[in-house]
Image (cartoon, helix red, strand yellow):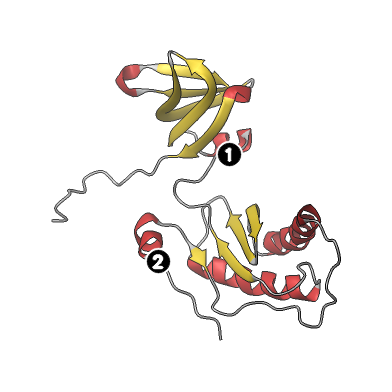
Amino acid sequence: MMLFELTEKQRTEGETTISPSNEHNNQGAPEAVNVSHGTVIDRIRSVATPILRSLGCDLFDLEFSGTVLRIFIDKMDGVTLDECAKASRHLGTALDVEEAIPGSYTLEVSSPGLDRPLRNQDDYRRFIEKKVKIRTAIKFQDQKVFVGRLLKVESEIVSISLGGGGKIDIPFDQIEGARLEVELPSGRNKGGN
């Protein structure tokens, strides 16, 4: 039996992380000798990608540190806790059968969260009209961090509207990092009434 728990942050901020209480163990698998981290990541990716596609999801990202494997899944309308749990079951089984990871490991499957990073132009296009925070490599208008509404992505240029009616066009190759900004629903007061 697998147990799943949500942290307070996950409940309030919408992040969905599944952490099965059991560890996956390749006890019957031969120990890999001199397997590089990159090789393990490539094997994990090659096993996970088709499984997630069959479940209607995409592999957004993965991290493998120590004995913890974190797989971030996504789809156009976001992923649910049930979808993360289902993906965790399928991925855990497949990774064990394929002996993709030498030794035991802990698998965590989650969504990228409400403040997800934007990594490529398709991500930007997907979130047109959403509030974003962009950090640039060089200064534009005497600053390197911009928060505003994503207007468009055209010809390697990302356009965002700034407060006060301003707008800035940022070359895609000058963006060091970008992520969505969490927006609380309007009409909600701080008192909770």
Determine the secondary structure under disc 1. Answer: helix
Q: What residue type is labelled 2?
A: Thr
Q: Which residue bears the numbered disc 1?
A: 123
At a point 78% along the width and 52% down the height, the residue shown is 38
At a point 80% along the width and 72% down the height, the residue shown is 99
Point out the tag, 1 or 2, that comes first from the N-terminus.
2
**Residue 64 against residue 76 in the figure, above or below:** below
In front of the other: label 1 or label 2?
Answer: 2
94 left or right, relative to 160: right
100 left or right, relative to 177: right
Query: How far is disc 1 from disc 2 in space, using C-alphas?
Result: 27 Å
| Quarter of the image with the N terminus in it | bottom right
Q: Where is residue 49, by image quadrant?
A: bottom right
Q: Where is residue 31, by image quadrant?
A: bottom right
| Residue 147 spot, x, y in % from top left | 40, 29
Q: Which residue bears the numbered disc 2?
A: 7
**Residue 42 against residue 2 in the figure, above or below:** above
- The answer, for residue 129, to whether it is visible in the render is no
Determine the secondary structure under disc 2. Answer: loop
| Residue 150 spot, x, y in % from top left | 46, 30
**Residue 26 against residue 136 in the figure, above or below:** below
Q: Which amino acid does label 1 sit on?
A: Asp
At a point 53% along the width and 42% down the height, the residue shown is 117
| Quarter of the image with the C terminus in it | bottom left
Q: Do the residues labelled 1 and 2 touch (CB within 8 Å)?
A: no
| Residue 109 spot, x, y in % from top left | 58, 64
Task: Please rate how many residues cluster around mark 2, counting C-alpha atoms within 10 Å: few if below 14, some from 14 to 19, many from 20.
Answer: few
